[in-house]
Image (spheres, rainbow, N blue to C red):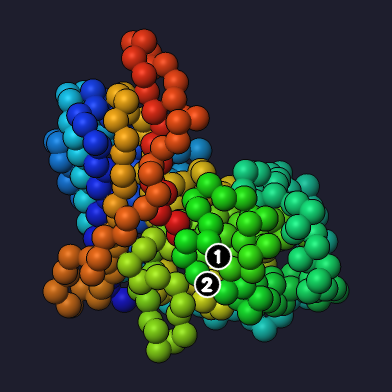
Amino acid sequence: MLLEVRHVTQYHYAEPVRESVMEVWMQPQKGIRQRLVSFELELDPAAQLFSYADPFGNAVYHFDVPQPHDRLNIVARSAVETQTPPPLPDALDQGEWDRLRSDFVRGENFDFLTHHGFAIETQALRAYVAQHQLDELRRRDPLSAVRRLSETIYSSFGYEAGVTRADSPIDLALKAERGVCQDFAHIMIAICRSWGIPARYVSGYLFTDRQAGDRSDPDATHAWVEVFLPSTRWIGFDPTNNVEAGERHIAAAVGRDYNDVPPSRGVYKGEAESQLAVGVSVRRARAALTEPEFIRIAQPSFSRSGRRRGPSGGIAYDQQQQQQQ
């Protein structure tokens, strides 16, 4: 499937700020089942782009806008050819648990076995596991257990934007029994890691199909989970939509949790209030690529607690894209 993505990010400042320094994780990955045809970033004000690979192998672009400005627009355009992954077996043998406990698997996947950031065990998570008898799933093989876990998260949570924020702990979604893709991914990751199954957060996009039962927002970024099983390697599960990750999923970056791979993150110097607007459009390449149907007004992109002294002594505020995935 050939897909085109347009991801628009707009920062607006109440008055000119002196400088912005930003990083973005928006380039789709290159892989066997995902071929990156093209990628470009358009910046306004214009700035020189640099790039590097982060510790997880993701492509990160960064730039500096040193002159005063009252807005910052980032437009990322991608064309990606995806393929349907090979079908997974119905089950694996029970020996897969032993293979997961091997020193090699644990050593190679240490980062994705350790609770971190938003994907952590809490009292509320343990209560959720007990309520749904999820630890009983460990009597099954790992693949069947993960598959059933994804189904349980899908059926036990309602999808609703605005209940949580990008920086909300999982306990908020667990208490409300509602949330968005990011929340469900963190909950699933934390449970998988508690079982000894390496799990990582995937940030990207989804070509939404309402007829297939997708409930995630078609005009937003998306997030799902990949787990590592020695017999299958990394495989993706989308607990938001109760599907295995397939040709409609476009992976942009992987990490331990959302904080490793936000779509954009940076700082600016100045006292001005800021506002963030985001729009995403994912379309088949044969169709005319249009502007996003709407621009989502997100939460203010910084908090006063993010205030700190910049290297030159000026005031800098952290700003991070707050549109939830």
Category of crowding for the residue at label 2, using alpha-carbon neighbours closer than 10 angstroms: few (below 14), some (14–19), many (at least 20): many
Which residue occupies 23% across, 69% down? 293
Can residue 194 be seen in the rendering of this structure? no
- Viewer-proximal residue among 36 and 114: 114
Horizontal and vertical percent for residue 222? 43, 63
Q: Which secondary structure, mark 1?
A: strand
Residue at which label 2 appears: 159
As drawn, 79 above or below 321: below
Whole-percent x, y for residue 193 in the image? 72, 55
Q: Which residue is mark 1?
A: 179
Q: Which mark is residue 264?
A: none
As drawn, the residue found furthest toward the bottom would be: 211
The one nearer the camera, 247 or 30, is 247
Judging from the image, what secondary structure is the residue with disc 2 in?
strand
Q: Position of residue 139 (x, y in %)?
A: 85, 74
Quarter of the picture containing the C terminus is: bottom left
